[in-house]
Image (cartoon, rainbow, N blue to C red):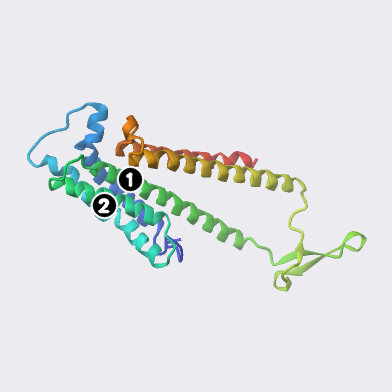
Amino acid sequence: MTAMGHGKHAGHSVAMFRDKFWISVVLTIPTLVWGHMLRTALGYTAPSFPGVTYFPAFFGTAVFCYGGLTFLKGAVQEIRDRRPGMMVLIALAISAAFGFSAAVLFGFPGPPLWEELASVVTIMLLGHWLEMRSVSQAQGALGELAKLLPDTATRVTGSGATETLDEVAVTELHDGDVLLVRSDPRDVARIITLSRASYRKMLQNSWRATGYNVIAIPLAAGVLALWGLTLTPAMAVGLMSLSTIIVAASAQLLRRAKR
């Protein structure tokens, strides 16, 4: 698959997100090395030379214009379709971070958010790359399965003592026909097990996402700032990365259910 024909990724490809991710990673590294987030956390002194103070702004802007443009275009399309979704949320987040950081660069008081901006764009590109690759693999697998479809099928007619099995051409099948796909009764148990496991994972991921938003958004907005409870942009980026990793790792556990 080279592109999706519809939905939020219309016109996008696996290769595009892959390339944008790796290039954004390279552009993000200088913002982290000369930014305040890692220096504060690790306590190191970054190399100093003329103009180095503008490195975070330069490379953060590059990531925003190169990697973030995909999300800005996606947000515009979602708004035009009157179906705002994830692209709009990402676009709002990175646009706010870019605008605030640019204002700080020109004298507005406050810490700039260049490394947080670059990190968010890079992480979101990684997530969309993995999503597109999963969709591509699934569609490829369906295509290969379609090639294995037989020319005939076993159609079940009647019931009870009058039940009969007839081999008919696939072209003769109609809506409502009952087909015998496999006769192994253990498949029913496997399907039920996988369905229940998938439903549990959906609920778990929904509760995780809800819990993150209920706790993190008010903290980031400063609701509890008077009591000393705040969420810095660096912590927000870390939690967002952690939530993405947890969801992906949790989904991989469904492999056990297939057994």
**Which secondary structure lies at badge 1?**
helix
Outermost left residue: 50
Q: Residue furthest right?
A: 161
Q: Quadrant of residue 51?
A: top left
Q: Please state, as top left, top right, bottom left or bottom right, where the C terminus lies in the image.
A: top right
- What residue sits 38% from the left and 56% below the top? 87
User: Closer to the camera, 66 or 224?
Assistant: 224
When the figure is inspected, residue 208 is found, relative to residue 157, above or below; the finding is: above
Q: CA distance from mark 1 to mark 2?
A: 10 Å
Q: Earlier in the sequence, mark 1 or mark 2?
A: 2
Amino acid type at circle 1 is: Val
The spot of residue 227 in percent (x, y) is: 34, 30
| Quarter of the view holding residue 221 | top left
Location of residue 246 in the rendering, given as x and y in whole percent from the top left corner: 47, 38
Please give the residue where the numbered disc 1 appears in the rendered image. Answer: 120
Q: Would you name the residue on which mark 2 appears?
A: 64
**Relative to the observer, which residue lies in front, 93 or 247?**
93
Q: Is residue 50 left or right of residue 125?
A: left
Can residue 58 be seen by looking at this rendering?
no
- Say what secondary structure mark 2 lies in: helix
For the residue carrying disc 1, how many other residues have a C-alpha within 10 Å: few (<14), some (14-19), or many (20+)? many
